[in-house]
Amino acid sequence: MTKEKRLILSIDQGTTSSRAIVFDVDGSVRSSAQKEIEQIYPKNGWVEHDPEEIWNTTIQVCQEALAQCNGSVSGIGITNQRETIVLWDRKTGIPLANAIVWQDRRTAQICAQLRAQNFEDLIIEKTGLLLDPYFSATKLCWLLDNIEGARKRAEKGELAAGTIDSFLLWRLTGGKLHATDATNASRTSLFNIHKQKWDADLMGIFRVPDIILPEVKDSADDYGYSIPKLLGKAIPILGVAGDQHAALIGQACINPGMVKSTYGTGGFVLVNTGTKILRSKHRLLTTLSYRIGGNVQYAIEGSIFNTGTAVQWMRDNLQFIKSADETEAYARNSVDDRIMFVPSFTGLGAPHWNPNARGAIYGLTRDTTPADMIRAALESVGYQSADLLNAMRIDIAGAIKTLRVDGGMSKNDWMLQFLANVTGVTVERSKVMETTGLGVAFLVSLQAGIINSLEDLDKLWDNDKIFEPNISTKKRQTLLENWALAIKSTETFNVE
């Protein structure tokens, strides 16, 4: 088999869509397909997905992408929205309820109760994560408590639970494999990042029986084969990683101190800390970069809950635009930089961690236009990123001079220039925009022996465009001071 005809299929199951991308072994995109999935909002602060829709759209896009190109697929990689949890029947593979999405805040009260019982420090120490509804454990506890008979069935071993990668692996292998990778496991609040295994103390705290949890494997590993009827033949599944960890690999941020940020539904900034487990002084998360050959690399991560959703809100609810692609032209036509939009629709993420905060807009006048509002929505991405980078500089005790960016919003040149301006760092946009899918394709390549190590990625990564800061330090300081005031006002106005 020639190198040129060897292909890799990356499944990228995200918050708003399911996507399949076929890569050449050099990281070039050969074909892709994408289908949106419905966002379900049963109550205020609740966010759900239909697992069957996730499965059906995933298979459809895989079939469509494969049909567009010729060549032999060497392996499948899966990358996914992370903390979203699914509970299903082991016998039938049918979910017992909708998946609870990472953005969902329904378990804020459970977190408050556990915090009152002084469990938070133990959870942080073992997992690197805060006690917050964002993570999977309280969501799984809620499902077991609120679906009739679920807890008893789980304790009998009749049910299986997992993040989206686990659910897809189960379906792809015909129920032969119940597994996840270490990066996804590290986002559940049930996984000990020091010992690299499910933790009995944590399972006791969150009341999750170990029998329902998947086997934890390396990010590049043997995950079995897809059943032939799905994709025309049995294909080995060789790589799995949570979406942000995959993007870190896809951006070739494999050395300590390198930073990437992905801007999609939310925004996720990760700085590689190598083999060191650093505990943040700013309530950022300690997480895995990846685990390969049993060797673990760590990172510090800051999560912004709402970035792309702010633009979606402008499009769908306010109907200011018909497409997100229009935002750049609107922003360029705005001359008002005084509006501050805090898009905390589902709470504030790092470094604020306020699950009860809700969105707010400051500085409106009778002259305010839709263009000004759209500009403010884009600027909010830069402000939130600046908060994270400032915290990370202190946590790693080092300078951050370059930020590699990807995700749908990074196509917007105006937004990236503002990002460079307000953070004061050089922003590099990847030449391959699908870095999440690319990262898991690299994991497949590693497991298949196509590349020898992740160090080879330096030769494969290239930038599309570089954005340098072009405003004064004084102007930057003024903007950030106004943003800090907006954040303070938003946190003061609490919905609960």
Image (cartoon, helix red, strand yellow):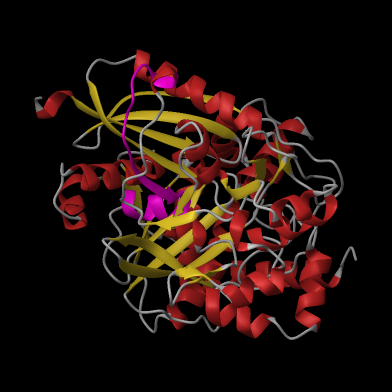
Residue depicted at x 60% and y 27%: 36
Residue 254: percent from left, percent from top: 27, 62
Query: Is residue 225 in sight in this rendering?
Result: yes
Position of residue 328 in the picture relative to residue 439 (left or right): right
Highlighted range, magenta: 230-250
Of all residues shown, which one is farthest toward the front? 156
Quarter of the image that includes the N terminus:
top left
Q: What residue is drawn where x is 43% and y is 76%?
A: 195
Using residue 178 as the reference point, say whether residue 144 is left or right of it: right
Q: Position of residue 139 (x, y in %)?
A: 72, 56
Q: Quadrant of residue 117?
A: bottom right
- Asked whether residue 296 is drawn in magenta, I would say no
Residue visible at 60% across and 58% down in the picture: 211
As rendered, which of 95 and 441 lies closer to the eye?
95
Percent across and percent down for residue 258 are 32, 65
Residue 244 colored magenta? yes
Q: Position of residue 462 (x, y in %)?
A: 23, 46
Q: Is residue 215 above or below residue 193?
A: above
Residue under the image location 24 percent in, 15 percent down? 70
Q: Is residue 309 left or right of residue 117?
A: left
